[in-house]
Image: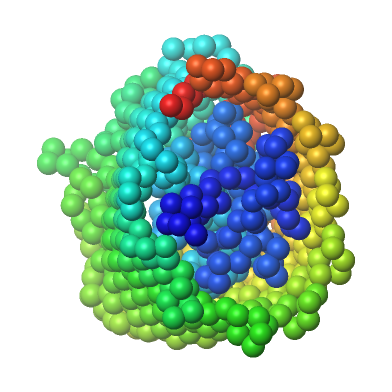
Amino acid sequence: MTLLNTRSLLLASGITALAPAIGHAQETGSEDSTASAMPELVISATRNRATVSQTPQRTRIISREEIEQQLAISDDPGQVLSNLIPSYSPGRQKLTNAGETLRGRAPLFMVDGVPQTNPLRDSARDSYTIDMDMVERIEVIYGASAEHGLGATGGIINFVTREPESGSLKQSVTAKVTTDDDVSSDGQGYKLGYRLSGQSGQWDYLAGATFQERGVYYDGKDEPIGIAYPGEIQNSQSYDLLAKVGYWIDDNQNVEFFVNRFDLEGGDDYRPVSGDRDNGVPTTAEKGDLPGEPGYNEVTTARLSYTHADWLGNEVDAQLYSQAFRAQFATTPYFPYQDGSGNTQYDQTRNESDKLGAKFTLTRGGLFNDHLSLTTGLDLLQDETKQVLVHTDRVYVPKSRFRNVAAFLQGDIKVTDRLSLHTGVRQEHAELDVDTYQTIDRSNVTQDNVTVEGGKPDFDETLFNGGLIYQVTDWAQVYANYSEGFGMPDVGRVLRGISTPGQDVDTLLELQPIVTEQREIGARFDWDRYELEVSYFESDSDYGERLTEENGVWVGNREKTEIKGAEVTASARITAQHKLGASYTYTDGESDTDGDGDVDTELTGINIPPQTVKLSWSAAWAPVLSSHLQYSHFLDRNVDNDELDFDGYGLLDGSVVYRSPVGQVSLGIENLLDTDYFTYYSQAARVSDDYYFRGRGRTVSLGYQLDF
């Protein structure tokens, strides 16, 4: 095969919708014959490069077509993920994604395999580090996983960026305007984008840029939605710059450099107005100067990778990566100090995190007459994080250095033509280094509270996974899986919250790792035009972390937690032009709040999503005209704390796309029925007059795209 043909096939397989396969019911196009000719896509987030039907647990690849369907309606990553991923919590519609969980636990977010999650001080903004226009597909691994090390106690969500297109220079221009249904001037926003890519000899390249200005959000009663202290996506500006260049050494070897810069900054001309939760009065916003500096996200992700498809019969993948993450939070009433005139002022905080890492993977297939495939590798990570007070220049969370070394071995065994065994082990060694520091006095942040002796605690964990897949018939497959995930508690939250003198970092039990064990069984069915997947899981941690709010501040409680749930997804291609989809998810969990070893208290909405039913209908009315309609219903949920009971609601969204010779036009409507509701987080996660937000009302988006 020539170099050009090899590259073209690899690129095409990376940007084309999946072929029908057991366990994958996601294709949205109408060209069934073309899709069937394509191989099933590999999940790059799996270290052994498995496909969906080769994994003994629930996985999913979300195609670019599905992402575009959602972006026509809303470009909020939280909304997109909630609409597309069963067992993902309802989106908060804020810059922070605190409370957006996967199967009741925190997922590990990655961009092209580079971790975005911050293990030392969780900013709860790790899904807002790249513009979704730069994403080609989203890979989802459900449940605890140690494949990429730290942080994936709830699963993995990997944003795979766009690949250069084959052939000569290709360009794309996009424009979009968004408004509330009253067309209020301050409720309007717009977005512009440009992308070019191509190949030249042994080089391929891609560059893209987006700029977006968002208006104020309005609820179903045409009132402005409240401003959240941690950070906002409404009334904000953002840009994204992406560059990718690759060089093919020969047919099998490729070197690629990728860099992405994402910057989002909130506005300063609207301020929050507290609500009255007891009387059903929502938190709103009004015109006026926001005290302090606006909140923002500034994230630069870079990766240098080398792949060899046939090095002495092995597949080799090596990556070096870095991430610089800055998250500034808006001013809150929780950090008072006295200025030079004796007046009370309030400070704001900024997280600063820098990562350096490497991943080395080697896979050898075809062993023992194609009955065994082995994957081994080594992962290295260094993370330095601190949290500072912006105006007083104080350190809120001391600089913490985290170093992690992990080696792993994964085996895939073909026992018979129908039965396969998948098992592996990963050895983690981690070290935390914190110098002696002083906590701050929360009544006056210019004063110290207590001195904490530094230390270098280290941790060693051996993590196992094992699963079976049995091909019952050509159209039915069952699987069972056991996996473990390795995570750290929010280290910064622990360190900053110490108020008792005489503490030292080496003996803080609260810094011990979180090891999550997951058991899962499931079945996949593929009847040509009809697909169904059913799964049940249990996820336990003997020493997990449950967040509670104390005096406006989240505090981590180390407790035993047990979570269980079930997921059902189905699709039916009624005709070549019409496809229906449906899903049902149930998740529930408890924690041991009294330390007697038995779980006794229901986990609230900060962890557990509600039962959810989702329906969708995609239609191709003509080669140039298509539509998409989706309905999400979040069912009521009652917990031990009556104040955090949830009154469910349903949302209907829709979009229409028209393709003409001079470009593609899309019309999307979020909350088509203009439903008036309070968001899930506002009802079920936090009792606060300052965080009692209604959800976004009917919102209209008009988009245009021209490829040339």
Residue 620 in view, yes or no: yes
Q: Is residue 209 above or below residue 114?
A: above
Task: Tell me residue 250's x, y (percent).
Answer: 37, 63
Nearer to the camera, 214 or 230: 214
Task: Tell me residue 65's x, y (percent).
Answer: 60, 38
Task: Tell me residue 518's x, y (percent).
Answer: 67, 72
On the image, which quarter does residue 516 sit in? bottom right
Residue 636 in view, yes or no: no
Identify the residue at the far left of this view. 340
Q: Residue drawn 44% across and 47% down?
A: 163
Nearer to the camera, 572 or 249: 249
Q: Residue drawn 52% across and 61% down?
A: 44
On the image, which quarter does residue 232 sit in? top left
Q: Residue drawn 48% across and 24% down?
A: 705
Q: Is residue 82 above or below residue 697?
A: below
Nearer to the camera, 381 or 663: 663
On the image, which quarter does residue 219 sit in? top right
Can you say which quadrant of the picture contains the C terminus? Answer: top left
Total numbered labels placed on residues in the image: 0
Q: Residue drawn 26% across and 79% down?
A: 453
